[in-house]
Amino acid sequence: AGVMSKGEECDWTSGLSLSPEETADLVPFKDPSRVYRTLTTADDKIYSQWQMRVHYYQWKKVKAMEGSEHMGGFTRILHSGHADKLMDEIPTDVVDPLPPHMTKGFVVLSRPNAIDQWLRTFADKYPEQYYIMSEPDHLWLRPIPNLMLGEHTPAAFPFFYITPQKTPDITNKFLDKKISAKEMKMIDPIGNSPVMISKGDLRRIAPAWHNVSLAIKHDAEADKAWGWVLEMYGYSFAAWNAGIHHKLYPNFMAQPPWDKAISDFYILHYTYGCDYNEKGVFTPGKVGAWRFDKRRFSGRYPPKTYPPFPPKVPELTRKLVDIVMEAANALPDWPDE
């Protein structure tokens, strides 16, 4: 669907497919309740804070719906090293950021480090044995059941642009055992988010995810090849090296404007700009007469009211703006700039 697949040109189909024999070998859930905790990493910048507030507002709204029995607690993992003004509004644990000489200006590298720190420092104070890793620009559309197939078969969303087989020489730098480009098609085309996974398996992956991501950033060839998605490759490679394979769910997450209808998606991810002309015609690559792009609000909050939709703007884009506007008007101390 939409941006996450390329039809017949896509190297993956429906993700991890299992034979009856393999299905029989699935390890049952250690905790039969299958309740998971939501983990969302963030920093303390305004850009992250307003997204985080909308994210948690919508998460609470969905958790109150029927069918949310697998949704447990929520934790914002704040990797700023200090508390911020949202501590009383959003359940938060604070971890340390990576120093600048390690991130080399790429703040996303703090994400695997934050998860690894949190697992070592905070995880055992909570009852959940399963997690969903999320991001501030994820909006829950409906309750998400635990999509894992068993204790050691996590669930993930497939990204069409994670293609390690296209750069086999670079990929093999970060695998414990060298494999062919053909075999690399079996590496899960994912990042860490959204992913549902057991505490035990995340503890196996997280340190390696951190180390591999840093190694990629500090390798000029790999950094140039994978750029802004390099820590996604880091997670994918760490899982592969650990022998952990994910069940892939294309309906785990919608990404407007490429996805247009709410359909059976669980999460709305608003990473792309949504641009339309006065008639509501999508204008990809061109700033539209009407647009919603989170990057317009990198140093300030979105307003409490937004320009009316032109006709024919798709349902999913409308839902995105409606959720943001609802939260902006419901939450206290939302600056109307």
Image (tube, grey):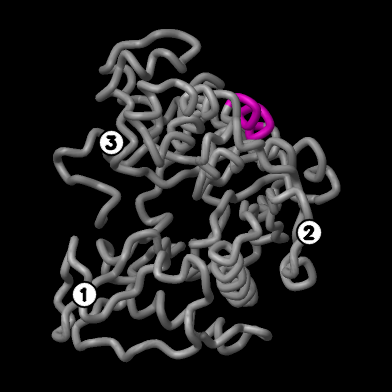
Task: Using the rendered image of the protein, determine whether residue 3 is visible from the camera's viewpoint.
Answer: yes
**3 vs 2, front mark:** 2
Rendered image quadrant of residue 158: top left
> Going from the N terminus, do you reach mark 3 or mark 2 first?
3
For disc 1, the marked residue is 288
Crowdedness of circle 2 by 10 Å Cα count: few (<14), some, many (20+)?
some
Is 205 covered by the magenta stretch? yes
Please, what is the three-letter code of the amino acid marked with disc 1? Answer: Gly
Please, what is the three-letter code of the amino acid marked with disc 3? Answer: Trp
SS at badge 1: loop
Please, what is the three-letter code of the amino acid marked with disc 2? Answer: Ala
How far is mark 3 from mark 1, CA to CA?
Answer: 33 Å
Q: Is residue 14 left or right of residue 229?
A: left
User: Is 178 rendered above or below residue 330?
Assistant: above
What residue do we see at 61% from left, 83% from top? 334
User: Is 122 rendered above or below residue 255?
Assistant: above
Work out whether residue 110 or residue 268 is closer to the camera in this orientation and state it: 110
User: Is 199 rendered above or below residue 225?
Assistant: below
For disc 3, the marked residue is 12
Work out whether residue 329 or residue 301 is closer to the camera in this orientation and state it: 301
How far is mark 2 from mark 1, CA to CA?
Answer: 38 Å
What residue do we see at 57% from left, 62% from top? 48
> Going from the N terminus, do you reach mark 3 or mark 1 first?
3
Rendered image quadrant of residue 315: bottom left
SS at badge 3: loop
Q: Is residue 183 left or right of residue 331?
A: left
Work out whether residue 290 or residue 118 is closer to the camera in this orientation and state it: 290
User: What range is drawn magenta here?
Assistant: 201-208
Rendered location of residue 255, percent (x, y): 34, 60
For disc 2, the marked residue is 83
